[in-house]
Image (cartoon, coloured by chain):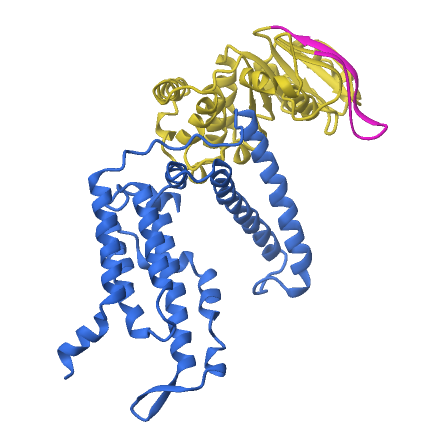
Chain colours: A yellow, B blue
Amino acid sequence: MIEFQHVSFAYEKNKDVLHDMSFRIGKGESVGLIGANGAGKSTIMKLLLGLLEGEGKVLIDGTEVKKETLGEIRAKLGFVLQNSDNQMFMPTVYEDMIFGPLNYGLSREVVDKRVDEVLSRLHLEDLKHRYNHKISGGEKRMGAIATILAMEPAAILMDEPTSALDPYNRRIVINTIRELEQTKLIASHDLDMILDTCDRVILISGGRIAADGPAAEILSDRELLEANRMELPLSMNVHPYTSGA
Amino acid sequence: MDELAARRSPIHRLHPAAKLLTTIAYILITLSFDKYDLSGIVPMVLWPVLMFQISGVEVRTCFYKLRIVLPLVMAVGLFNPFFDRDILFHIGSLGVSGGVVSMITLMLKGVFCLMASFLLMATTKIDSLCAALRKLHVPAILVSLLQLTYRYVGVMTEELAVMTEAYHLRAPGQKGIHISAWGSFLGQLLLRSMDRAQELYSSMLLRGYHDHFHYADIDRFSIKDALYMAGCILFFLVLRYADIAQLVGGLFVR
């Protein structure tokens, strides 16, 4: 479904952010993309979406990401931005949800039906006609996910989907992600959320893949995580007070 | 503005093209008054007053939203009294110069035109307005530009609010922003709002946006809309060519 073949990218000359990176994500897989700040997670996302252009090949469903194929590629990928304010640019949640599908040429009837289905699936019916500037951060994040689901993408990319959420809203977002059937690539520092939602983890460090394997295996490797400026997820950490030590 | 435009009233329900064309007609007729025709232009206030009443939009909301632009409009003609000193008429023993009359006329023209534009925006969603513009064969690129500008102003205002709050938290007791900080403040505001606008634009591109919006579905232009438009324009013409102020004044003064 998603393939990186020897991809390199630099924002400035001779300063590679990504260096000769290759990986493949199969259909239906749920993959966590982790790494310290500046490791290159967001750059990978932008390369996949064709917002940046690097060396090597990026393939989505066998189609190479290039200027001529951007329309086709973007119809297959949904991207949930880290800052939902930048994703929800229309006055109401409903208007935001219909924006993408209408651009892809669907009729108003089909789009309206799709919007109702998505809102009902996420239990967000009350949000439909609310104004984006009047809903809470958690509701906005859920609204942003809803706008992407209304496009029915084959794969969903998420950049820090649980950042700035309280525990209750964070749990709702996690449960929603778990229920999504699409291929998922989630970039985050919230390793507990990654453990909850992903089967596989790709650890990026210094523009290269430092580790790629089952989530439980990588996220329980304290040495590996600490060597890459991260910590064990709290749920993997045995606390001295609760362990009876 | 979006919330005001989403309200329900007979004016809100009218076709956006009817409202747009009526507003344009009002503005053109208002601007056509002679600069000394103060008594002629005053009755032009009747239409906005009527529209405020029917639409349920509060007058104070209008003046609150226009508080930044209004002083600029009011400043137009401020120097007229200094250049045009010929006395046109007397109020008691006080001579009123042509400059004073033209200044007030210009101010009223500006205020009335702003009120009419505000009423249009407060009773019509931007998407519907853009859809109407497309129906009137305004080029798609211009309409998209209008819509993107409308959104960009919102983004800029949000960034301005965040930056102002951050400034005041570190400058307690200070009113406004000190003149020494204006340069960097405006520069940062521009950079931040441009970054956010770029991010928003990327988000639009990723959801299939390509050069034009899919505008709101608007109803067909009905007889009711045509009657509203024709009635309003007729009313403006009556206000323009019949000296209402003199007629009303004639009832009380021989």
Lateral position of residue B29 relative to residue A87, left or right: left
Lateral position of residue B227 relative to residue B218, left or right: left
Q: How far across and down, in percent of the image, does residue B177 sit?
A: 60, 62
Name the residue: 20% across, 40% down: B223
Q: How far across and down, in percent of the image, does residue A134 sit?
A: 42, 40
In the foreground, B231 or A177: B231
Magenta-colored span: A4-26
Q: Quadrant of the C terminus of chain B?
A: bottom left
B188 w.r.t. A93: above or below = below
Q: How far across and down, in percent of the image, does residue B81 sit?
A: 46, 81
In the foreground, A41 or A78: A78
Q: Is residue A13 magenta?
A: yes
Q: How far across and down, in percent of the image, does residue A34 sit?
A: 69, 20
How many numbered callouts? Answer: 0
Name the residue: 29% across, 71% down: B40
Q: Residue furthest bottom?
A: B93
In the foreground, A211 or A2: A2
Lateral position of residue A69 relative to residue A54, left or right: left
Whether residue A5 is visible to the viewer of this picture, yes or no, is yes
Name the residue: 29% across, 40% down: B15
B38 w.r.t. B18: above or below = below
Q: Is residue B35 magenta?
A: no
Q: Residue furthest right?
A: A14
In the foreground, B186 or B86: B86
Q: Quadrant of residue A224?
A: top right
B140 w.r.t. B94: above or below = above
Whether residue A245 is visible to the viewer of this picture, yes or no, is no
In terms of secondary structure, what is the magenta stretch mainly? Answer: strand
